[in-house]
């Protein structure tokens, strides 16, 4: 069945792009980062839960960073406080990196698909 | 016994007797409340996530789409007859309203890749140097640069989305546009398009590449309106099934 004004709904969807390879790579990459459901298979439940918990921690960590930068820009922190806050956030980032490695997760794994409103991070 | 549901429609539709569903099962149509569910009967067996099964699910929904626009379910749900009836009964008005919204429409997709390198390092920070800056302060300054770059990217991506919306205005009934400023695939848009203007919509989107050489486009469709029915999310919320 051909697509035409008289027959606007073709039997098969059409995919049109001049950059097929580029989109294939990007879609594959995005697809790989989308979290699958938490698997209740006993062998992988630990990693599934770790992924969920670490995603939430990562989300909160980023919020804390933004808040810290706002306070720094607002000028209500002394140089010593900026240094302390920066060190604390740096250690938090390092700790999270260690935990990700421990559970075999990459940075792209730490995200949640929130359906129509997009992804958490 | 359980059901494997493919989609909901307002009235029974004509389907080929040769059409087979997931796992090669027969396709049935059952009245559920004020709607009709297109489904297969199921036993205790798991639904195997295979390419063939996913394509069979899609083939059923697609054949229904050729007759009428359905409220499709995503692949892999299993429910008891009581669960399905409870879901439809409790959401009867919402489901009818959604069917009305989707009537005679299909889903069309536009994905956009930004044809440039994303600069997440961002511009050099403009803040006053911090006295005796140590590792911690340097860390915060680098985060500040990242946040500024993200904000700048977000503004540009929002402008792309606004351009896309203005280009498709008048040709779409509804739209869902997801922005990802930190990635190369910056915009994923789904448009609900009435079949009567599908030809005009396709002619319009065919011009995008010429108009925006800074962007790469992938347009596709017609698809069943998965993005606009959202049955999957509601189903899980209501029934706790997967």
Image (cartoon, coloured by chain):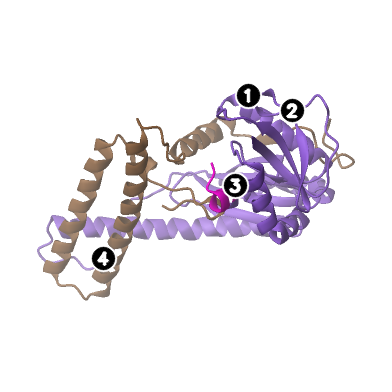
Chain colours: A brown, B purple
Query: Residue B37, relative to residue B87: is it above or below?
Result: above
Bin the neighbour count of mark 4 within 10 Å (Cα to Cα): few under 14, some 14-19, many 20 and up. Answer: many
The residue that appears at 69% across and 52% down in the rendered structure is B88
Q: What element carries label 2?
A: loop
Provide the chain ID for the residue under circle 2.
B
Measure how far apart labels 2 and 4 are at the Cα level: 59 Å
Query: Which residue is disc 4 drawn over?
Result: A68
Bin the neighbour count of mark 2 within 10 Å (Cα to Cα): few under 14, some 14-19, many 20 and up. Answer: some
x, y percent for residue B62 = 74, 36
Measure how far apart labels 2 and 3 are at the Cα level: 22 Å
Q: Do labels 1 and 3 share a chain?
A: yes
Q: In the displayed structure, does residue A65 sit left or right of residue B19?
A: left
The residue that appears at 59% across and 52% down in the rendered structure is B234
Query: Which residue is disc 1 drawn over?
Result: B52
Q: Which residue lies furthest to the right in this view?
A: A6
Measure how far apart labels 1 and 2 are at the Cα level: 15 Å
Cβ atoms at labels 1 and 3 below 8 Å apart: no
Q: Do labels 2 and 4 share a chain?
A: no
Measure how far apart labels 4 and 1 are at the Cα level: 50 Å
Return the mark for residue B232: 3
The residue that appears at 35% across and 43% down in the rendered structure is A49
Provide the chain ID for the residue under circle 1.
B
Query: Which residue is disc 2 drawn over?
Result: B26
Q: What element carries label 4?
A: helix
Q: Which residue lies furthest to the left in this view?
A: B132
């Amino acid at each position: 069945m051909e697509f035409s004004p008289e027959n606007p709904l073709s039997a098969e969807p059409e995919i049109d792009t001049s950059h097929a390879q580029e989109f294939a790579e990007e879609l594959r990459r995005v697809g790989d980062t989308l979290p699958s459901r938490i698997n209740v298979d006993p062998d992988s439940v630990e990693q599934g839960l770790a992924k969920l918990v670490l995603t939430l921690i990562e989300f909160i960590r980023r919020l804390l960073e933004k808040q810290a930068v706002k306070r720094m820009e607002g000028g209500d922190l002394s140089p010593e406080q900026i240094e302390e806050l920066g060190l604390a956030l740096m250690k938090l980032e390092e700790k999270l990196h260690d935990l990700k490695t421990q559970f075999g997760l990459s940075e792209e794994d730490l995200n949640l698909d929130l359906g129509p409103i997009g992804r958490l991070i | 016994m359980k059901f494997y549901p493919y989609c909901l429609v307002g009235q029974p539709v004509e389907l080929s007797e040769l059409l087979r569903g997931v796992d090669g099962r027969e396709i049935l149509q059952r009245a559920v409340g004020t709607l009709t569910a297109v489904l297969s009967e199921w036993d205790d067996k798991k639904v195997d996530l295979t390419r063939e099964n996913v394509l069979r699910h899609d083939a059923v929904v697609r054949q229904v789409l050729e007759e009428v626009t359905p409220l499709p379910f995503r692949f892999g749900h299993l429910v008891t007859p009581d669960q399905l009836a409870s879901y439809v009964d409790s959401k009867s008005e919402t489901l009818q309203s959604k069917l009305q919204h989707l009537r005679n429409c299909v889903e069309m997709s536009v994905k956009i890749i930004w044809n440039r390198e994303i600069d997440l390092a961002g511009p050099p920070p403009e803040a006053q140097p911090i006295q005796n800056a140590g590792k911690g302060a340097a860390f915060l300054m680098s985060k500040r640069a990242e946040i500024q770059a993200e904000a700048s990217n977000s503004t540009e991506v929002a402008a792309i989305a606004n351009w896309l919306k203005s280009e498709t205005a008048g040709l779409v009934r509804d739209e869902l546009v997801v922005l990802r400023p930190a990635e190369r695939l910056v915009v994923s848009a789904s448009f609900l398009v009435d079949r009567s203007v599908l030809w005009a919509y396709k002619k319009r989107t065919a011009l995008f590449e010429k108009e925006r050489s800074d962007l790469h486009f992938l347009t596709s469709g017609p698809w069943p309106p998965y993005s606009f029915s959202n049955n999957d999310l509601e189903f899980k919320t209501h029934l706790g099934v997967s």
